Image: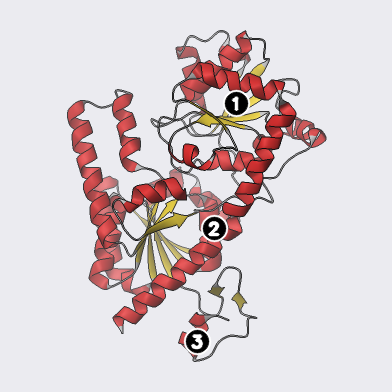
Amino acid sequence: MCSRCLQSTGMYCNGAYCQAKLGVCLMNPPKVLFFVEGFTDIRFVIGLSRISSLTMAVPAAAYVASGLKDRVQAANVQVNVEEIPGGRLRFQAASLLYLLKHAREFDVLLCQEVLRGALNGTLVGKLTNTPVITYMGVAPVEYFRCRRERKQIGPLRAWGGETVIRFLMTFNGRLATRCLAMGPYLRDVAAQYCPRSEVGLYYGVDTQVFCPANEQERVALRKKRNLPLDKFIVFLSSRISHEKDPETVLRATALARQKGLDAVVINLGGGYQDFIKLAHELGLQKPDEWVLGRPPAHPMTEVADYFRSADVMALASLAEGAAYSTLEALSCGTPVVCTAVGGMQVQLQGYARLTPRRDADAMCEEFLWVAAHAAEARAQAMRGRQYVVEQWDSKKAFSDLAAVFEQVSRNGRTASQ
């Protein structure tokens, strides 16, 4: 029984045209404009296309360079894509004009993140009376401070950058109809700027794909992905960026090897060559023998194989939001060792092996514990899988999002009548 049918036709549908579990009517799905300022995941795009009549406005260069354009075309997604040309400043101006011209055509304007891209969205939403949802996937101030910690910027730029970030978060928080933040930790961060904040699950975790593998399956997966069969595999799936701490994972693995654990560490992603280079810069012993890197793997068809075949998934960070890779690992029943910061500290208590920030010795000891207590470590990870199935499953993610679209678009239409 769909309230959207009642509003559009004067009667409820009989259920045959509704995806009841998703809360969206196929006869009259909400028209959603997803305004992307950088890169987004193909899984989110596919999910959005299933619960809405979707249009994406994207920066043309980033859309191609990130590989998202190829993935959208390969997935045959039902989406209209508006590619907006220009670098950062030109895109900001051109996208503002695009939004001013087209915003009224949509039921909901969904903005990626809460900074400069959302600035155009919330401003135009206010001017055109279009409901705007912002989506927070990182803690902007914490992430930016990591640049200063790494000495990538000086004190003046650090102060100026943080001032701008706080202004944008405050401005967008006041104008947004709703702010969705990935997980409870980021929800609490977002609520400081937007009182209408709640948890959003982004694309969630496909717990049917990210599922446990038995010993035979793990051997087969290692052969399939050309991974060593007789090594303790540490899997680091995250990108190499200023808020991550790959140095600690590398040092911890090196220490574990010194203590007798025959371990290798593998990184997937566009920065895998930087990861391998970093191992050499740290002066670690014979890194070519145990530091592995691979180009990005497709998140829907390939990445799960690495989680399922690994002995442990490791993530060290200086700051962290939702840490989806840890949730995907737990969904596979793979033990997780990670830093007790941000969303990982809030979400993973009791499910992962948490270590202090920048503490390679502590992370090394957890690797050794997992290796020595494999059954117990897997049992803990399986409790984590149950948590992911109940709280982070992709079906729940898009069902919740469909309900938000219905609510904000209905309220928006009522306010405009």
Q: Residues within 10 Å of mark 2 (few under 14, many from 20)?
A: many
> Is residue 16 in view from this perspective?
yes
Front residue of 41/232: it is: 232
Residue 188, numbered label:
none
**Residue beneath disc 3:** 6
Pinpoint residue 52: horizontal percent, then vertical percent: 50, 69
Residue 134 picture quarter: bottom left
Image side of residue 282 versus residue 348, left or right: left
> Is residue 76 in view from this perspective?
no
**Residue beneath disc 1:** 266
CA distance for labels 3 and 1: 53 Å
The quarter of the picture where the C terminus appears is bottom left
Residue 253 picture quarter: top right
* Residue at x 63% of width, y 51% of height: 389
The image shows residue 127, relative to residue 394, as above or below, that is below
CA distance for labels 3 and 2: 25 Å
**Residue beneath disc 2:** 397
Image side of residue 175 versus residue 268, left or right: left
Mark toward the start of the polypeptide (3 vs 2): 3
Front residue of 240/101: it is: 240
The quarter of the picture where the N terminus appears is bottom right
Mark toward the start of the polypeptide (3 vs 1): 3
Do the numbered discs 3 and 2 sit on residues whose CB atoms are within 8 Å? no
